[in-house]
Image (cartoon, grey):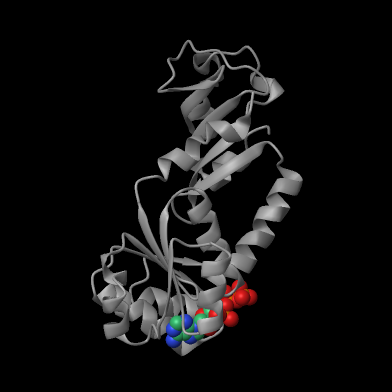
Amino acid sequence: MNLTSLKFLGNLRRENNQFAVIGLGRFGRAVCSSLHKMGYEVLGTDIDEKLVTQALTQKIASHAIQLDSTEPEALKEAGIFEMDTVIVAIGNYLQESIITTLNVKEAGVKNVIAKASSEIHGKLLKRVGADRVVFPEHEAGCALAETLTKPAILDRFELDPENSIVEVLVPKEFHDKTLADLNLRSRYGISILAVCSGEKFMTNPAPGQKLKEGSIMIVIGGNKDIEKLPI
Ligand code: ATP
């Protein structure tokens, strides 16, 4: 079975279609090209003309425009305010990052994700309205530690800092047991949203559903409770 082809959590995220990435540094370029490869419409922008040209020649975005994102008029003209999601990928220029985030939120963009390079930067971004603040270096470090110690967790969708939905391999302790036998809600405080049966996911599995070691289950719960699973 090809696990990546199942893309269960990926499909859950497919509700947004149009993205703008402001700032084409290493982080911004990675966001752009990943979204573009997944088939989404992505507009990449940067104040630096060279990076814009590079984004176009390397085909990491559907469109790329040179602009100064601290100028609301420039953002408006580029159509950024009509995007479903805007990613402010300006980590090293505090003032520009804050003003840009303020500009897009004030213009009514629903989903604004901003990159922070320090804790205080993150707090400021929240204050000006960022819907989500990411700390890529910190998060990558934590994720690496987790995959080194918890290889059974295949994917994670953070609902908030305390709660997640995870795609996880069924441990041998759960093999051939039904959900009713396992009683995971009271034992671990988690719920199983779906189990993988063959090539397909079965959502809302019945209490009589048996689990198979090495197959995939989708679990929702507090991070601390998920940690307690024997995986
Ligand atoms: P890394 O490249 O290490 O991932 P980063 O993603 O934090 O770092 P920065 O060094 O913060 O990247 O730069 C992001 C990009 O933002 C740069 O390419 C820079 O030219 C661009 N940028 C800075 N100010 C503005 C602005 N006012 N308008 C548009 N783009 C800007």
**Rendered-image quadrant of the N terminus:** top right
Which residue is drawn at the image coordinates 54% and 62% (left, top)?
Answer: 59
Q: Is residue 179 above or below residue 163?
A: above
Task: State the image coordinates of residue 49 (x, y, percent, origin top left).
Answer: 50, 83
Q: Quadrant of residue 58?
A: bottom right
| Total numbered badges shown on the rendered structure | 0
Which sits in the foreground, 143 or 181? 143
Task: Say above or below: 82 vs 24.
Answer: above
**Left-right relation of 46 to 226:** left
Where is residue 81, by image quadrant?
bottom left
Whether residue 220 can be seen here = no
**Residue 63 coordinates in the image, percent (x, y):** 42, 66
In front: 25, or 115?
25
Q: Is residue 38 visible?
A: yes
- Is residue 113 toward the left or the right of residue 170 in the image? left
Q: Quadrant of the C terminus?
A: top right
x, y percentage for residue 171?
Answer: 67, 26
Tell me: 168 left or right of 66.
right
Q: Residue furthest right?
A: 148
Image point (47%, 26%), residue name: 194
